[in-house]
Amino acid sequence: MPHVIVKLYSGKSKQQKAVLAEAVTKAVMDSLGYGQESVSVGIEDVEPKDWASRVYGPDIVDKPDTIFKKPGYDPR
């Protein structure tokens, strides 16, 4: 029962988020073999000024064992 949370800069439309959610759902289904009914996707808007404190620090730097694709930036 995968639940994926995508955090991104604020400003994307609901339509863009829906397209992303469908793509993430398909990727989970294709790579892990789950049916669509088993996958949920949440999308959280984050203001750019808050990115380092709300996402980069707590979700990336503080949890290195959970990061399977590292970012190519460092906002600190």
Image (cartoon, helix red, strand yellow):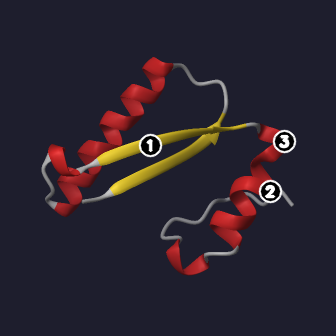
Location of mark 3 (residue): 49
Mark 1 → mark 3, Cα distance in angstroms: 21 Å
Does residue 8 sit above or below 56 in this rendering? Answer: above
Residue 75 horizontal side relative to residue 25, left or right? right
Question: Residue 42 is drawn in which quadrant?
Answer: top left
How far apart marks 2 and 3 lie (CA) works out to: 9 Å
Q: Does 68 sit above or below residue 7?
A: below
Q: Where's residue 66, x and y in %?
A: 51, 74
Where residue 18 sits in the image (x, y, percent)?
39, 27
What secondary structure is found at the residue carrying circle 3? helix
Name which quarter of the figure residue 36 lies in. top left
Q: Amino acid at mark 3?
A: Lys
Question: What residue lies at 75% left-to-right and 37% top-to-bottom?
Answer: 47
Residue at numbered disc 1: 42
Please state which amino acid type lies under the numbered disc 2. Answer: Ser
Q: Nearer the viewer, residue 66 or 30?
A: 66
**Relative image position of residue 76 (x, y in whole percent):** 87, 61
Quadrant into which the N terminus falls: bottom left
